[in-house]
Image (cartoon, rainbow, N blue to C red):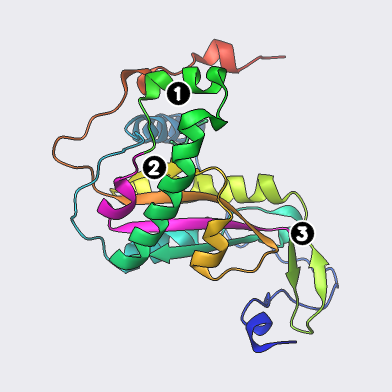
Amino acid sequence: MTKEDKSFQSSIPLDHEYKALPIPYKWEMSDKEMISKSEEFYELMKKRHTVREYSSRPVPREVIENCIRAAGLAPSGANHQPWHFAIIENPDHKQKIRDAAEEEEKTFYAGRASDEWLGALEPIGTNDQKPHLTEAPWLIVIFAQRTSIDRNGRKFKNYYVNESVGIATGFLITALHKAGLSTLTHTPNPMKFLNELCGRPSTEKPEMILVVGHPAEDATVPAHAKWKKPLEEIMTVF
Ligand code: IYR
């Protein structure tokens, strides 16, 4: 195994023995409290908007680390935790990512995307310019690990990788929102260039760039983004 491979090794336990522990923490909440907590959380999440214009106000790395720790608590297939988060604050590094992303986006908006797709994006108002990639204080590039290597250098498969990474990303966006930060989920298409720019192995698939920071003074949100389907449409009761 090369030295490079070693830095990609998973710390997953090597024994496969089943052991049970008492539940380490249990909520003790009345129905009334649960209703009130769920209302509170809904109100918190209602305040989340995807933001495309960022202020240059810096964000302490500790906040980003805490939120990624929280994301790392997400459930995952066989508890393999098949994710990696590359965090980028360095302006030159952000510029490289922006240049590469805008390069891909130019061809996307100039014809690679279907008319139907471009039509769907019209009310969001996106285009091939991605100034937020250099303006926001942090970029988090999220990678999905299709396979991993254990401490013996053996390759193993991960399961439900998309689902697991999706849940962890949801945790991360929620944690950042709760910490007072705004985000943008950006998916340049294609985004293989991120492996090279973040020094990640080819077994990892870049899923998205999460742009993180405070909104610019004059930031706006597309009116379309504030339309959410009503509960009756997204839920069926049996
Ligand atoms: N990746 C492009 C296009 C894009 C696609 C979807 I679906 C969006 O919801 C938003 C944008 C871009 O980032 O502009």
Against 21, residue 166 (above or below) is above
| Sooner in the amino-acid sequence: mark 1 or mark 2 | 1
Taking the image as drawn, is residue 72 in sight?
no
Residue 24 found in image quarter: bottom right
Q: Which contiguous range is marked in magenta?
A: 129-146
Residues marked 3 and 2 touching at CB (< 8 Å): no
94 inside magenta stretch? no
Closer to the camera: disc 3 or disc 2?
2
Against 15, residue 115 (above or below) is above
Instruction: Classify mark 2: residues with Cα within 10 Å, few (<14), some (14-19) or many (20+).
Output: many
User: Residue 191 location, x and y as percent?
Assistant: 55, 50
Closer to the camera: disc 1 or disc 3?
1
User: Residue 82 location, x and y as percent?
Assistant: 67, 60
**Residue under label 1:** 121
Name the residue at 54% across, 71% down: 199
Name the residue at 81% across, 72% down: 155
Closer to the camera: disc 1 or disc 2?
1
In the image, what residue type sits under mark 1? Leu
Taking the image as drawn, is residue 188 in sight?
yes
**Residue under label 2:** 184
**Residue under label 3:** 158
Residues marked 1 and 2 touching at CB (< 8 Å): no
In the image, what residue type sits under mark 2? Leu
Residue 117 found in image quarter: top right
User: Residue 107 location, x and y as percent?
Assistant: 49, 38
Name the residue at 74% across, 76% down: 13
Q: CA distance from mark 3 to mark 2?
A: 27 Å
Against 207, residue 193 (above or below) is below
User: Residue 197 location, x and y as percent?
Assistant: 49, 65
Instruction: Classify mark 3: residues with Cα within 10 Å, few (<14), some (14-19) or many (20+).
Output: some
| Nearer-the-camera pick, 7 or 68 | 7
